[in-house]
Image (cartoon, rainbow, N blue to C red):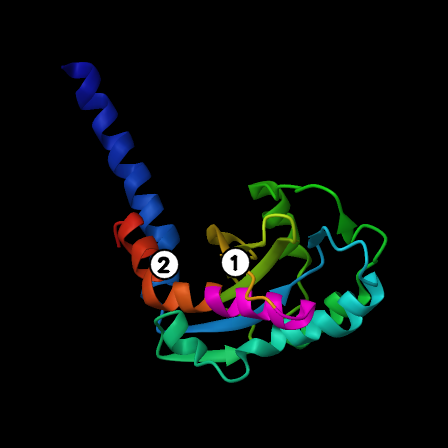
């Protein structure tokens, strides 16, 4: 009995730290939308596509899907500040040698934390931000795999990260995978964010 009594404060402390970590994600009235980071993206089954066209044209097309979407509603916030200039720059500068691939390469928590540290500075110096880090667009499985990552702008600490997937919508490469991104965004607004909030016990 004494053993359990000693463990209780530790458990309470852990739960308290968890609640503190996710508070900005689910409690903040605002968020900075960083955009879609494709610097780690693997395009699987696209051997006939030009990697330069993917980088120079499609990356911009896929980021543009949010232009006519109310991202505040998507992330259940009162306001969203769009700050995608930095993402546009690093996407445009990514090397293309490893863009086309034959198999999935899973992004680990360490990979994601490292990528967040490397993101360009925001016009906002503090607060909550969210970025999509693309893992793969897989023509074989017809699935887009993306990590939705909330982080602290000042410290670059990852506060919440979830891997999500969506089917491509068919059509040209640009339109098909833009459709997948729209589905991911729609799912976050309609069900995922609420489910994450419940999972976090917030």
The residue lying furthest to the left in this view is 1
From the viewer's perspective, is residue 2 above or below residue 82?
A: above
Which of 100/124 is in front? 100
**Image: magenta residue range:** 171-183
Q: Position of residue 24 (x, y in %)?
A: 38, 62
Q: Is residue 6 left or right of residue 175?
A: left
The residue labelled by disc 2 is: 192
Q: Position of residue 36 (x, y in %)?
A: 61, 66
Snapshot quadrant of residue 12: top left
Disc 2 element: helix
Residue 151 in magenta? no
Q: Which mark is residue 42?
A: none
Badge 1 crowding class, 10 Å Cα cut-off, few under 14, some 14 to 19, many 20 or more, is many
Q: Is residue 136 left or right of residue 191?
A: right
Q: Earlier in the sequence, mark 1 or mark 2?
A: 1
Disc 1 element: strand
The residue labelled by disc 1 is: 167
Q: Position of residue 109 (x, y in %)?
A: 56, 42
Q: Is residue 165 left or right of residue 13?
A: right
Quadrant into which the N terminus falls: top left
Q: Residue at x 29, y 44 (%)?
A: 16
Q: Nearer the viewer, mark 1 or mark 2?
A: 1
Q: Residue at x 21, y 15 (%)?
A: 3
Say how many tags the image has. 2
From where the camera sits, is residue 153 visible? no
Q: Residue at x 57, y 77 (%)?
A: 65
Q: Is residue 113 left or right of residue 183?
A: right
The residue lying furthest to the bottom in this view is 68
Which of 96/117 is in front? 96
Which of 64/114 is in front? 64
- Main SS, magenta region, reads helix
Q: What's the distance in space between the residues labelled 1 and 2, CA to CA?
A: 16 Å
């Amino acid at each position: 009995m004494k053993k359990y009594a000693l463990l209780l404060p530790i458990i309470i402390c852990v739960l308290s730290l968890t609640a503190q970590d996710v508070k900005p994600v689910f409690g903040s009235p605002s968020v900075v939308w960083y955009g879609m980071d494709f610097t780690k993206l693997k395009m699987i089954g696209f051997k006939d596509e030009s990697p330069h066209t993917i980088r120079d044209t499609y990356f911009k097309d896929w980021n543009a899907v949010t232009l006519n979407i109310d991202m505040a509603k998507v992330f259940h916030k009162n306001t969203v500040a769009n700050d995608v200039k930095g993402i546009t720059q690093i996407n445009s500068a990514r090397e293309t040698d490893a863009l086309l691939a034959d198999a999935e390469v899973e992004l680990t928590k360490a990979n994601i934390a490292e990528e967040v540290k490397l993101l360009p500075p925001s016009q906002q110096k503090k607060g909550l931000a969210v970025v999509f880090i693309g893992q793969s667009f897989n023509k074989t499985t017809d699935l887009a795999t993306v990590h939705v990552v909330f982080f602290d702008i000042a410290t670059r600490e990852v506060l919440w990260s979830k891997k999500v997937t969506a089917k491509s919508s068919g059509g040209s490469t640009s339109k098909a995978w833009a459709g997948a991104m729209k589905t991911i965004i729609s799912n976050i607004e309609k069900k995922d964010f609420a489910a994450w909030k419940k999972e976090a016990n917030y």
